Image: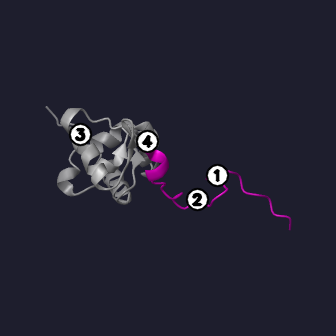
């Protein structure tokens, strides 16, 4: 039986993106997917980070929407502990996204102009 193929290009892009999140900051799975060039693939981000701990990738800095820790039981407890050690504060069961959210750069898109916006006609 053939083995399932893994899109290592996707995994590599996600891991590189996660490594950009500085200590003391967090991002959501959706934000990481979008910044990696794969919007709409938030669920796959979790899969790409499955073995990130062993590779030294700061997986703990990626959270569910609204700052929720989505990992169950001990894994979720460990994630919260690691984040608290980095100075992340929590409000209820969620990370304080207002204080600790990391905003990825626009990736070459000029501010104030959509990547898909039509060019202005010149007045020559």
In this picture, residue 90 sits left or right of residue 47: right
Residue 74 quadrant: top left
- Tell me, for residue 30, which label it has, or none: 4
Give percent across and percent down for residue 113: 66, 55
Q: Which residues are magenta?
A: 96-124
Q: Earlier in the sequence, mark 3 or mark 1?
A: 3
Q: For mark 1, what is the residue? A: 114
Element type where label 2 sits in the image: loop
Number of the front mark, 3 or 1: 3
Q: Residue at x 86, y 64 (%)?
A: 123
Mark with earlier residue (1, 4): 4
- Report, in whole angstroms, how far the alpha carbon at label 1 lies from the one at label 4: 19 Å
- Dot 1: few (<14), some (14–19), or many (≥20) neighbours within 10 Å? few
Residue at the far bottom: name it.
124
CA separation in Å, label 2 and label 1: 7 Å
The residue carrying mark 3 is: 77
* Furthest residue toward left: 1
Q: Secondary structure at mark 1?
A: loop
**C-alpha gap between disc 2 and disc 4:** 19 Å
Does residue 97 appear left or right of residue 50 in this picture? right
Q: Is residue 124 above or below residue 91?
A: below
- Decide which of 1, 16 is in the foreground and name it: 16
- What residue appears at the point 34 percent right and 50 percent down from the top-left corner? 61
Mark 3 → mark 1, Cα distance in angstroms: 40 Å
- How many marks are shown on the rendered structure? 4
* Image quadrant occupied by the N terminus: top left
Question: Of label 2 and label 3, which has the lower sequence position?
Answer: 3
| CB contact under 8 Å: marks 2 and 3 | no
Q: Calculate the distance from the C-alpha at mark 2 to the C-alpha at mark 3.
A: 38 Å
- Mark with earlier residue (2, 1): 2
Please name whichever residue, 124 or 106, is drawn nearer the observer in this view of the structure.
106
Q: Is tag 3's residue or tag 4's residue first in the polypeptide sequence? A: 4
């Amino acid at each position: 039986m053939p083995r399932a193929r893994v899109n290592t290009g996707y995994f590599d892009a996600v891991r590189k993106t996660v490594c950009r999140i500085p200590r003391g900051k967090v991002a959501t799975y959706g934000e990481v997917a979008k910044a990696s060039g794969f919007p709409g693939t938030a669920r796959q981000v979790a899969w790409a980070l499955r073995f990130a701990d062993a590779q030294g990738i700061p997986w703990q800095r990626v959270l569910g929407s609204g700052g929720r820790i989505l990992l169950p039981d001990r894994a979720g407890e460990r994630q919260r502990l690691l984040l608290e050690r980095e100075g992340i504060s929590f409000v209820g069961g969620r990370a304080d996204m207002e204080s600790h959210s990391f905003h990825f750069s626009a990736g070459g898109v000029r501010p104030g102009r959509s990547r898909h916006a039509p060019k202005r006609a010149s007045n020559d």
